[in-house]
Amino acid sequence: MATEKEDMQRQLLALRDRIDAIDEQIGKLISERARCAQSVAEVKKASGETLVTYYRPEREAQVLRRAMERNEGPLGDEEVARLFREIMSACLALEEPIKVAFLGPEGTFTQQAALKHFGSSAVTRPMSVIDEVFREVEAGAVNYGVVPVENSTEGVVTHTLDNFIGSNLKICGEVELRIHHHLMVSDVTHTDSITRIYSHSQSLAQCRKWLDAHYPKAERIAVNSNAEAAKRIKGEWNAAAIAGEMAAELYGLQVLSEKIEDEPDNSTRFLIIGTEQVPPSGEDKTSIVVAVKNSPGALHGLLEPFQRHKVDLTRVETRPSRTGAWTYVFFIDFKGHVDQLAVQSALADVAAQVSDLKVLGSYPKGVL
Ligand SMILES: C=C(O[C@@H]1C=C(C(=O)O)C=C[C@H]1O)C(=O)O
Protein backbone atom coordinates (compact mmCIF):
# COMPACT_ATOMS: atom_id res chain seq x y z
CA MET A 1 0.00 0.00 0.00
CA ALA A 2 1.30 3.40 -0.96
CA THR A 3 1.81 5.71 1.94
CA GLU A 4 0.06 9.06 1.94
CA LYS A 5 3.34 10.74 1.16
CA GLU A 6 3.98 8.54 -1.88
CA ASP A 7 0.47 9.22 -3.04
CA MET A 8 1.02 12.96 -2.84
CA GLN A 9 4.33 12.66 -4.70
CA ARG A 10 2.63 10.77 -7.50
CA GLN A 11 -0.10 13.37 -7.82
CA LEU A 12 2.45 16.21 -7.87
CA LEU A 13 4.52 14.49 -10.56
CA ALA A 14 1.45 14.01 -12.72
CA LEU A 15 0.40 17.66 -12.32
CA ARG A 16 3.91 18.88 -13.10
CA ASP A 17 3.97 16.75 -16.24
CA ARG A 18 0.75 18.39 -17.31
CA ILE A 19 2.14 21.86 -16.57
CA ASP A 20 5.27 21.06 -18.60
CA ALA A 21 3.15 19.97 -21.56
CA ILE A 22 1.01 23.11 -21.33
CA ASP A 23 4.11 25.32 -21.10
CA GLU A 24 5.44 23.71 -24.25
CA GLN A 25 2.25 24.65 -26.05
CA ILE A 26 2.24 28.18 -24.64
CA GLY A 27 5.88 28.60 -25.73
CA LYS A 28 5.07 27.49 -29.26
CA LEU A 29 2.04 29.78 -29.44
CA ILE A 30 3.99 32.76 -28.13
CA SER A 31 6.65 32.17 -30.79
CA GLU A 32 3.97 31.91 -33.44
CA ARG A 33 2.38 35.14 -32.20
CA ALA A 34 5.75 36.90 -32.24
CA ARG A 35 6.35 35.78 -35.84
CA CYS A 36 2.89 37.13 -36.76
CA ALA A 37 3.71 40.48 -35.16
CA GLN A 38 6.96 40.51 -37.16
CA SER A 39 4.98 39.91 -40.34
CA VAL A 40 2.67 42.80 -39.45
CA ALA A 41 5.77 44.97 -39.17
CA GLU A 42 6.96 43.74 -42.59
CA VAL A 43 3.61 44.64 -44.15
CA LYS A 44 3.71 48.07 -42.53
CA LYS A 45 7.25 48.59 -43.81
CA ALA A 46 6.28 47.52 -47.35
CA SER A 47 3.43 50.06 -47.40
CA GLY A 48 5.90 52.64 -48.69
CA GLU A 49 5.10 55.22 -46.03
CA THR A 50 8.13 57.21 -44.96
CA LEU A 51 7.40 57.17 -41.24
CA VAL A 52 6.31 53.67 -40.23
CA THR A 53 4.58 53.47 -36.86
CA TYR A 54 4.77 49.97 -35.47
CA TYR A 55 3.12 50.79 -32.16
CA ARG A 56 -0.68 51.11 -32.38
CA PRO A 57 -2.25 52.21 -29.07
CA GLU A 58 -5.83 51.64 -30.24
CA ARG A 59 -5.05 48.09 -31.38
CA GLU A 60 -3.22 47.28 -28.14
CA ALA A 61 -6.16 48.54 -26.09
CA GLN A 62 -8.48 46.27 -28.09
CA VAL A 63 -6.20 43.24 -27.61
CA LEU A 64 -6.15 43.83 -23.84
CA ARG A 65 -9.90 44.39 -23.57
CA ARG A 66 -10.57 41.21 -25.53
CA ALA A 67 -8.19 39.23 -23.30
CA MET A 68 -10.17 40.45 -20.29
CA GLU A 69 -13.55 39.66 -21.84
CA ARG A 70 -12.42 36.17 -22.79
CA ASN A 71 -10.98 35.41 -19.39
CA GLU A 72 -12.70 32.49 -17.61
CA GLY A 73 -10.61 32.67 -14.44
CA PRO A 74 -9.30 31.57 -12.03
CA LEU A 75 -6.85 34.43 -12.79
CA GLY A 76 -8.34 37.91 -12.42
CA ASP A 77 -9.01 40.02 -15.54
CA GLU A 78 -6.28 42.50 -14.67
CA GLU A 79 -3.78 39.72 -14.13
CA VAL A 80 -4.55 38.24 -17.53
CA ALA A 81 -4.32 41.66 -19.19
CA ARG A 82 -0.94 42.23 -17.56
CA LEU A 83 0.38 38.99 -19.05
CA PHE A 84 -0.84 39.99 -22.50
CA ARG A 85 0.59 43.46 -21.96
CA GLU A 86 4.04 41.88 -21.53
CA ILE A 87 3.65 39.58 -24.53
CA MET A 88 2.75 42.54 -26.76
CA SER A 89 5.57 44.61 -25.34
CA ALA A 90 8.08 41.86 -26.16
CA CYS A 91 6.62 41.32 -29.64
CA LEU A 92 6.81 45.02 -30.42
CA ALA A 93 10.40 45.23 -29.16
CA LEU A 94 11.41 42.67 -31.81
CA GLU A 95 10.90 45.45 -34.33
CA GLU A 96 12.17 48.38 -32.29
CA PRO A 97 11.94 48.82 -28.52
CA ILE A 98 9.68 51.76 -27.90
CA LYS A 99 11.45 54.75 -26.28
CA VAL A 100 9.58 56.54 -23.51
CA ALA A 101 10.58 59.67 -21.58
CA PHE A 102 9.17 59.99 -18.06
CA LEU A 103 9.35 62.36 -15.12
CA GLY A 104 12.37 60.90 -13.38
CA PRO A 105 14.67 60.05 -11.82
CA GLU A 106 14.55 56.25 -11.98
CA GLY A 107 12.06 54.85 -9.51
CA THR A 108 9.29 57.44 -9.74
CA PHE A 109 5.61 56.56 -9.89
CA THR A 110 5.69 57.99 -13.40
CA GLN A 111 8.22 55.32 -14.41
CA GLN A 112 5.98 52.70 -12.84
CA ALA A 113 3.09 54.09 -14.91
CA ALA A 114 5.22 54.04 -18.09
CA LEU A 115 6.08 50.37 -17.56
CA LYS A 116 2.48 49.52 -16.72
CA HIS A 117 1.34 51.10 -19.99
CA PHE A 118 4.11 50.01 -22.38
CA GLY A 119 5.31 46.80 -20.68
CA SER A 120 8.82 46.06 -19.52
CA SER A 121 10.40 45.77 -22.98
CA ALA A 122 10.02 49.54 -23.39
CA VAL A 123 13.15 51.64 -22.92
CA THR A 124 12.36 54.32 -20.34
CA ARG A 125 14.40 57.53 -20.07
CA PRO A 126 14.26 59.72 -16.97
CA MET A 127 13.81 63.51 -17.38
CA SER A 128 14.28 65.87 -14.44
CA VAL A 129 11.22 68.08 -15.04
CA ILE A 130 7.85 67.81 -16.81
CA ASP A 131 8.82 70.43 -19.44
CA GLU A 132 11.73 68.24 -20.47
CA VAL A 133 9.44 65.27 -21.06
CA PHE A 134 7.43 67.45 -23.46
CA ARG A 135 10.58 68.76 -25.17
CA GLU A 136 12.07 65.30 -25.62
CA VAL A 137 8.91 64.05 -27.38
CA GLU A 138 8.68 67.24 -29.49
CA ALA A 139 12.31 66.82 -30.56
CA GLY A 140 11.66 63.21 -31.64
CA ALA A 141 14.32 61.87 -29.26
CA VAL A 142 11.72 59.44 -27.87
CA ASN A 143 8.44 58.01 -29.21
CA TYR A 144 6.28 58.92 -26.21
CA GLY A 145 6.32 60.71 -22.90
CA VAL A 146 4.55 59.97 -19.61
CA VAL A 147 3.48 62.75 -17.22
CA PRO A 148 1.25 62.80 -14.13
CA VAL A 149 -1.95 64.80 -14.54
CA GLU A 150 -4.26 64.35 -11.58
CA ASN A 151 -4.32 62.77 -8.19
CA SER A 152 -7.46 61.56 -6.45
CA THR A 153 -6.64 63.37 -3.20
CA GLU A 154 -4.58 66.36 -4.31
CA GLY A 155 -6.17 67.30 -7.63
CA VAL A 156 -4.40 68.34 -10.80
CA VAL A 157 -0.73 68.53 -11.55
CA THR A 158 -0.98 72.13 -12.79
CA HIS A 159 2.43 72.07 -14.41
CA THR A 160 1.38 69.35 -16.83
CA LEU A 161 -1.79 71.20 -17.84
CA ASP A 162 0.16 74.43 -18.35
CA ASN A 163 2.57 72.63 -20.67
CA PHE A 164 -0.27 71.53 -22.95
CA ILE A 165 -1.30 75.13 -23.61
CA GLY A 166 1.88 75.88 -25.51
CA SER A 167 2.47 72.46 -27.03
CA ASN A 168 1.31 70.70 -30.18
CA LEU A 169 1.72 67.25 -28.74
CA LYS A 170 -1.26 64.90 -28.61
CA ILE A 171 -2.54 62.85 -25.72
CA CYS A 172 -2.26 59.22 -26.88
CA GLY A 173 -3.32 57.36 -23.77
CA GLU A 174 -3.98 57.37 -20.04
CA VAL A 175 -2.89 55.13 -17.16
CA GLU A 176 -4.13 54.99 -13.64
CA LEU A 177 -1.89 53.85 -10.81
CA ARG A 178 -2.73 53.08 -7.17
CA ILE A 179 -0.27 55.13 -5.16
CA HIS A 180 1.12 53.90 -1.86
CA HIS A 181 3.55 56.12 -0.01
CA HIS A 182 6.10 54.80 2.46
CA LEU A 183 8.34 56.60 4.92
CA MET A 184 11.88 55.39 4.27
CA VAL A 185 15.32 55.89 5.75
CA SER A 186 18.89 55.03 4.79
CA ASP A 187 21.27 52.84 6.77
CA VAL A 188 22.87 55.88 8.44
CA THR A 189 19.60 57.41 9.65
CA HIS A 190 19.03 57.76 13.39
CA THR A 191 15.36 56.87 13.27
CA ASP A 192 14.57 58.57 16.59
CA SER A 193 16.02 61.93 15.49
CA ILE A 194 14.35 62.56 12.13
CA THR A 195 14.05 66.31 11.68
CA ARG A 196 13.69 66.63 7.90
CA ILE A 197 11.37 64.77 5.55
CA TYR A 198 11.90 65.04 1.80
CA SER A 199 9.35 64.31 -0.91
CA HIS A 200 7.52 65.77 -3.88
CA SER A 201 5.05 68.47 -2.80
CA GLN A 202 2.10 66.33 -3.96
CA SER A 203 3.23 63.40 -1.85
CA LEU A 204 3.82 65.59 1.21
CA ALA A 205 0.28 66.87 0.74
CA GLN A 206 -1.10 63.35 0.32
CA CYS A 207 0.43 62.34 3.68
CA ARG A 208 -0.28 65.59 5.53
CA LYS A 209 -2.46 64.15 8.31
CA TRP A 210 -0.12 61.24 8.93
CA LEU A 211 2.87 63.60 9.14
CA ASP A 212 0.97 65.93 11.51
CA ALA A 213 0.27 62.98 13.78
CA HIS A 214 3.66 61.23 13.65
CA TYR A 215 6.28 63.88 12.80
CA PRO A 216 4.66 67.21 13.71
CA LYS A 217 8.01 68.93 14.26
CA ALA A 218 9.97 67.61 11.28
CA GLU A 219 10.64 70.08 8.47
CA ARG A 220 8.89 69.02 5.24
CA ILE A 221 11.07 69.71 2.25
CA ALA A 222 9.61 69.60 -1.26
CA VAL A 223 11.93 68.34 -3.99
CA ASN A 224 11.44 67.60 -7.71
CA SER A 225 10.36 63.99 -7.28
CA ASN A 226 9.95 61.20 -4.74
CA ALA A 227 12.86 59.35 -6.23
CA GLU A 228 15.05 62.41 -5.80
CA ALA A 229 13.97 62.51 -2.15
CA ALA A 230 14.98 58.86 -1.79
CA LYS A 231 18.35 59.54 -3.39
CA ARG A 232 18.89 62.66 -1.29
CA ILE A 233 18.63 61.01 2.14
CA LYS A 234 21.43 58.53 1.54
CA GLY A 235 24.08 59.86 3.89
CA GLU A 236 21.82 62.23 5.87
CA TRP A 237 21.56 60.89 9.40
CA ASN A 238 18.54 63.02 10.42
CA ALA A 239 16.42 62.74 7.27
CA ALA A 240 13.70 60.49 5.89
CA ALA A 241 11.95 60.39 2.51
CA ILE A 242 8.43 59.68 1.39
CA ALA A 243 8.37 57.66 -1.82
CA GLY A 244 7.08 54.49 -3.46
CA GLU A 245 8.32 50.92 -3.21
CA MET A 246 10.27 51.13 -6.46
CA ALA A 247 12.38 53.99 -5.08
CA ALA A 248 13.07 52.11 -1.84
CA GLU A 249 14.33 49.11 -3.79
CA LEU A 250 16.32 51.14 -6.28
CA TYR A 251 18.15 53.21 -3.68
CA GLY A 252 18.50 50.46 -1.07
CA LEU A 253 16.41 52.18 1.60
CA GLN A 254 14.58 50.68 4.52
CA VAL A 255 10.83 51.23 4.82
CA LEU A 256 10.03 52.54 8.30
CA SER A 257 6.25 53.00 7.90
CA GLU A 258 4.16 51.55 5.11
CA LYS A 259 1.16 53.05 3.28
CA ILE A 260 1.12 56.40 5.06
CA GLU A 261 -1.15 58.15 2.52
CA ASP A 262 -4.18 59.82 4.12
CA GLU A 263 -6.68 58.43 1.60
CA PRO A 264 -6.62 54.63 1.26
CA ASP A 265 -7.69 54.65 -2.40
CA ASN A 266 -5.15 57.25 -3.41
CA SER A 267 -4.48 56.99 -7.15
CA THR A 268 -2.81 59.08 -9.82
CA ARG A 269 -3.73 59.43 -13.47
CA PHE A 270 -0.94 59.76 -16.00
CA LEU A 271 -1.10 60.82 -19.63
CA ILE A 272 0.84 59.38 -22.54
CA ILE A 273 1.94 62.15 -24.89
CA GLY A 274 3.03 61.67 -28.48
CA THR A 275 3.01 63.35 -31.86
CA GLU A 276 0.10 61.60 -33.56
CA GLN A 277 -3.67 61.47 -33.17
CA VAL A 278 -4.73 57.92 -32.23
CA PRO A 279 -7.59 56.35 -34.28
CA PRO A 280 -10.73 55.15 -32.40
CA SER A 281 -10.42 51.98 -30.28
CA GLY A 282 -14.14 51.61 -29.55
CA GLU A 283 -13.91 53.00 -26.02
CA ASP A 284 -12.18 56.36 -26.08
CA LYS A 285 -11.82 59.65 -24.27
CA THR A 286 -11.06 63.11 -25.59
CA SER A 287 -9.34 66.05 -23.87
CA ILE A 288 -9.70 69.63 -25.02
CA VAL A 289 -8.59 73.02 -23.76
CA VAL A 290 -10.65 76.17 -24.32
CA ALA A 291 -10.11 79.84 -23.47
CA VAL A 292 -13.17 81.75 -22.26
CA LYS A 293 -13.74 85.42 -21.39
CA ASN A 294 -15.19 85.73 -17.92
CA SER A 295 -18.75 86.84 -18.70
CA PRO A 296 -22.02 85.82 -16.96
CA GLY A 297 -23.15 82.41 -18.15
CA ALA A 298 -19.86 81.63 -19.88
CA LEU A 299 -19.40 78.31 -18.12
CA HIS A 300 -23.00 77.26 -18.73
CA GLY A 301 -22.69 78.14 -22.42
CA LEU A 302 -19.52 76.14 -22.60
CA LEU A 303 -20.95 72.97 -21.07
CA GLU A 304 -24.47 73.02 -22.50
CA PRO A 305 -23.52 71.69 -26.00
CA PHE A 306 -22.11 68.54 -24.42
CA GLN A 307 -25.42 67.83 -22.76
CA ARG A 308 -27.37 68.63 -25.95
CA HIS A 309 -25.27 66.24 -28.04
CA LYS A 310 -25.24 63.58 -25.28
CA VAL A 311 -21.50 63.65 -24.75
CA ASP A 312 -20.49 62.53 -21.23
CA LEU A 313 -18.13 64.88 -19.44
CA THR A 314 -15.61 63.17 -17.16
CA ARG A 315 -13.63 66.17 -15.90
CA VAL A 316 -13.63 69.97 -16.02
CA GLU A 317 -10.62 71.88 -14.73
CA THR A 318 -10.04 75.65 -14.66
CA ARG A 319 -6.73 77.48 -14.89
CA PRO A 320 -6.20 81.24 -15.04
CA SER A 321 -4.94 82.11 -18.50
CA ARG A 322 -1.46 83.52 -18.83
CA THR A 323 -2.39 85.74 -21.76
CA GLY A 324 -5.08 88.14 -20.54
CA ALA A 325 -6.61 89.24 -17.26
CA TRP A 326 -10.08 87.78 -16.58
CA THR A 327 -9.77 85.11 -19.17
CA TYR A 328 -10.01 81.51 -18.08
CA VAL A 329 -8.72 78.33 -19.55
CA PHE A 330 -10.81 75.18 -19.15
CA PHE A 331 -9.47 71.67 -19.54
CA ILE A 332 -12.36 69.39 -20.40
CA ASP A 333 -12.33 65.58 -20.69
CA PHE A 334 -15.24 63.61 -22.11
CA LYS A 335 -16.14 60.17 -23.40
CA GLY A 336 -15.89 59.63 -27.14
CA HIS A 337 -13.52 60.23 -30.04
CA VAL A 338 -13.17 63.26 -32.33
CA ASP A 339 -14.05 60.97 -35.26
CA GLN A 340 -17.60 60.60 -33.86
CA LEU A 341 -20.37 62.83 -35.13
CA ALA A 342 -21.80 63.71 -31.69
CA VAL A 343 -18.37 64.83 -30.53
CA GLN A 344 -17.80 66.88 -33.66
CA SER A 345 -21.20 68.60 -33.28
CA ALA A 346 -20.58 69.41 -29.61
CA LEU A 347 -17.11 70.77 -30.37
CA ALA A 348 -18.42 72.94 -33.23
CA ASP A 349 -21.02 74.50 -30.88
CA VAL A 350 -18.42 75.07 -28.18
CA ALA A 351 -15.95 76.58 -30.66
CA ALA A 352 -18.58 79.13 -31.71
CA GLN A 353 -18.63 80.61 -28.18
CA VAL A 354 -15.03 80.60 -27.05
CA SER A 355 -11.97 82.57 -28.06
CA ASP A 356 -9.85 79.48 -28.51
CA LEU A 357 -10.35 75.70 -28.63
CA LYS A 358 -7.68 73.06 -28.98
CA VAL A 359 -8.19 69.31 -29.08
CA LEU A 360 -5.41 67.77 -27.01
CA GLY A 361 -6.22 64.30 -28.27
CA SER A 362 -8.59 61.36 -28.42
CA TYR A 363 -7.19 58.19 -26.88
CA PRO A 364 -8.21 54.73 -25.64
CA LYS A 365 -9.74 54.77 -22.17
CA GLY A 366 -7.18 53.26 -19.78
CA VAL A 367 -7.45 49.46 -19.74
CA LEU A 368 -5.09 48.44 -16.96
C1 LIG B 1 1.19 43.61 -34.42
C2 LIG B 1 0.95 44.91 -34.51
O1 LIG B 1 1.84 45.89 -34.10
C3 LIG B 1 2.08 46.17 -32.73
C4 LIG B 1 2.04 44.97 -31.89
C5 LIG B 1 0.84 44.50 -31.39
C6 LIG B 1 0.71 43.13 -30.78
O2 LIG B 1 1.71 42.51 -30.47
O3 LIG B 1 -0.44 42.66 -30.67
C7 LIG B 1 -0.28 45.34 -31.43
C8 LIG B 1 -0.23 46.62 -31.94
C9 LIG B 1 1.04 47.22 -32.33
O4 LIG B 1 1.54 47.98 -31.25
C10 LIG B 1 -0.36 45.38 -35.10
O5 LIG B 1 -0.46 46.52 -35.52
O6 LIG B 1 -1.30 44.57 -35.13
Image (cartoon, rainbow, N blue to C red):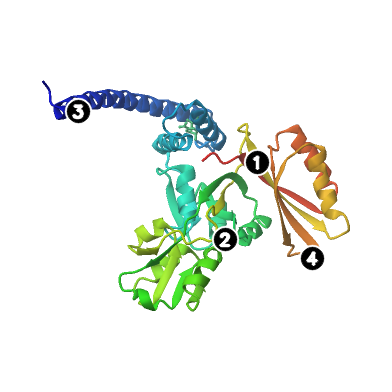
- Residue sitting at the far right: 296
Does ligand 1 reach within 8 Å of label 4's beta carbon?
no
Depth-wise, is mark 3 or mark 1 nearer the camera?
A: 3
User: Is residue 272 placed above or below 31 in the rendered structure?
Assistant: below
Disc 3 to disc 1, C-alpha distance: 53 Å
Does ligand 1 reach within 8 Å of label 3's beta carbon?
no
Q: Please tell me the numbered disc located at residue 285.
A: 1
The amino acid type of the residue labelled 2 equals Asp
The amino acid type of the residue labelled 4 equals Gly
Query: Which numbered disc flags the more N-terminal residue, 1 or 2?
Result: 2
**Residue 157 picture location, percent across and down:** 61, 59
Disc 1 to disc 2, C-alpha distance: 24 Å
Few, some or many residues within 10 Å of mark 4 (<14, 14–19, 20+): few
Disc 3 to disc 4, C-alpha distance: 77 Å
Depth-wise, is mark 3 or mark 4 nearer the camera?
A: 3
Residue 130: in sight, yes or no? yes
Query: Which numbered disc flags the more N-terminal residue, 3 or 4?
Result: 3
Q: Please tell me the numbered disc located at residue 324.
A: 4
Residue under the image location 80 percent in, 67 percent down: 325
Residue placed under numbered mark 3 in the picture: 8
User: Is residue 123 placed above or below 155 in the rendered structure?
Assistant: above
- Asked if the residues shown at circle 3 and circle 2 are in contact, with their CB atoms under 8 angstroms apart, the answer is no
User: Is residue 172 placed above or below 59 in the rendered structure?
Assistant: below
Residue 354: in sight, yes or no? no
Query: Which numbered disc flags the more N-terminal residue, 3 or 1?
Result: 3
The amino acid type of the residue labelled 3 equals Met
Disc 3 to disc 2, C-alpha distance: 60 Å
Residue placed under numbered mark 2 in the picture: 131
What secondary structure is found at the residue carrying circle 1? strand
Few, some or many residues within 10 Å of mark 2 (<14, 14–19, 20+): some
